[in-house]
Amino acid sequence: PGLVLSPPVAAADASRTRTPTHPTAVVTPTSEAEVVCAMRHAASEGWRVRPVGSLHSWSGVADALGALRLDTSSLDRVLGVDTERRRVLLQPGVRLVTLRRVLTAHGLTLGSWPMLLEQTVGGAVSTGSHGSSGIDGTL
């Protein structure tokens, strides 16, 4: 598969609370093979890689300054639901609002939901997103 690197474009996170970052390049893979290709290219160039989803972190964890920004938003498929084992197989770009609909349709839920359901599962897991109760834990 080919690799399409976009030129860096300044982009603030969705919360609009931080200064825009300037990645070395941006790639938006649509398959695992394209992720592998992007990672190999970054390694060959000596670039750090910063995977991002909806860029809604309140902190600087999505800062891609000087790195390859790996935009996972197109990796947004739910691959399977196992209701007996209460497990879901999905890609990191699935938004929490979509996950909630899928889980509800199968009689499942999470013990804690972050307030902002537009964030991606990958982003929510990587930043330790949590609900409003300290006893519910993180995703």
Image: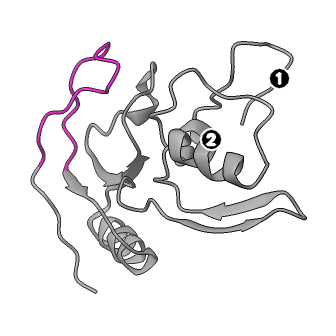
Q: What's the residue type where badge 1 is placed?
A: Asp
**Residue at (69, 46) in percent of width and height:** 104
Q: Mark 1 or mark 2: which comes first in sequence?
A: 2
Give the residues in magenta: 8-24
**Residue at (27, 37) in percent of width and height:** 65
Foreground mark, 1 or 2?
1
Secondary element type, mark 1: loop
Q: Residues within 10 Å of mark 2 (few under 14, many from 20)?
A: few
Q: In this picture, is 52 found above or below 43?
A: above
Residue topped by disc 2: 125
Secondary element type, mark 2: helix
* 16 inside magenta stretch: yes
The one of 13 and 116 positioned closer to us in this rendering: 116
| x then y, percent, for residue 135 | 86, 17
**Residue at (42, 62) in percent of width and height:** 75
Tell me the distance, in whole angstroms, between the alpha carbons under discs 1 and 2: 15 Å
Q: In this picture, is 107 found above or below 14?
A: below
Residue topped by disc 1: 136
Left or right: 46 with respect to 81? left
Left or right: 8 with respect to 100? left
Q: Which mark is residue 63?
A: none
* Image quadrant occupied by the C terminus: top right
| x then y, percent, for residue 12 | 23, 26
Q: In this picture, is 88 found above or below 57?
A: below
* Majority SS type along the magenta span: loop
The one of 110 and 31 positioned closer to us in this rendering: 110
* Image quadrant occupied by the N terminus: bottom left
Q: Residues within 10 Å of mark 1 (few under 14, many from 20)?
A: few
| Residues at discs 1 and 2 in contact (Cβ within 8 Å) | no
Left or right: 76 with respect to 139? left
